[in-house]
Amino acid sequence: MSEERPRQFATLYLASDHAGFAYKEAVKEWLSAENFLVIDAGAEAFEGEDDFPDFVIPAVGAMVGDREGEAGAIVFGGSGQGEAMAANRVKGARAVVYYGGNKTIPTLGREHNAANVLSIGARFVTIDEAKEAIWNWLHTEPLHEEKYARRNQKLDW
């Protein structure tokens, strides 16, 4: 994919449960080839009965605690909804969900809400659609207008 805009994260934390496992593995390989530092927080193997909070919460916690401040997280699940809910329980996380449809959702979440977590619904998008959404999100800078900063500050707790 062409890099028309600068990338916004140097380090990416990935996590998934069984429903998103194949996507996480494919995206890990792809992003590593694109020279991102990728940290795989699990699952390490496909396990049909695993639970997404066991992987998402530690991954997002590590991302928020990344001292460089240039980290993001991408999490994968069936719909991406539960994964985003788990991610947003971590102080400092701002997760946006993408499961197809309007392709601007991830970039709007990044621009307007400084989303540092992208949650992908693997049951609703192809790998190529997921990669396109990820690529665009990774290369979108948050808007610095006062209204966005004010609103986002109200999200911090």
Image (cartoon, helix red, strand yellow):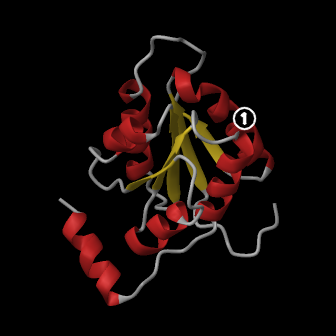
Q: Dot 1: within a 10 Å radius of its alpha carbon, few (fewer than 14), some, or many (20 or more) residues? A: few
The location of residue 60, given as percent across then percent down, is 41, 43
What residue is at 51 percent from the left and 54 percent from the top? 72
Q: Amino acid type of disc 1? A: Ala
Q: Helix, strand, or loop for circle 1?
A: helix
- Location of residue 146 by image quarter: bottom left
Horizontal and vertical percent for residue 87? 36, 43
Residue at image location 44% in from the left, 28% down from the top: 55
Of residue 69 and residue 25, the one placed in the foreground of this image is: 25
Q: Which residue lies under the disc numbered 1?
A: 26
Residue at the image position 54 percent from the left and 21 percent from the top: 18
Please identify the quarter of the rendering in which residue 94 is found. bottom left
Quarter placement of the N terminus: bottom right
Return the residue found at the far front: 101
In this rendering, the answer to whether 3 lies above or below 129 is below
User: On screen, 116 above or below 147?
Assistant: above
Vertical side of 45 occupied by 154: above or below: below
Q: Quadrant of the C terminus?
A: bottom left
Is residue 11 left or right of 87 when viewed as pictured?
right
In the rendered image, residue 75, in percent from the top left (x then y), is placed at 50, 40
> Residue 91's spot in the image, x, y percent?
26, 51
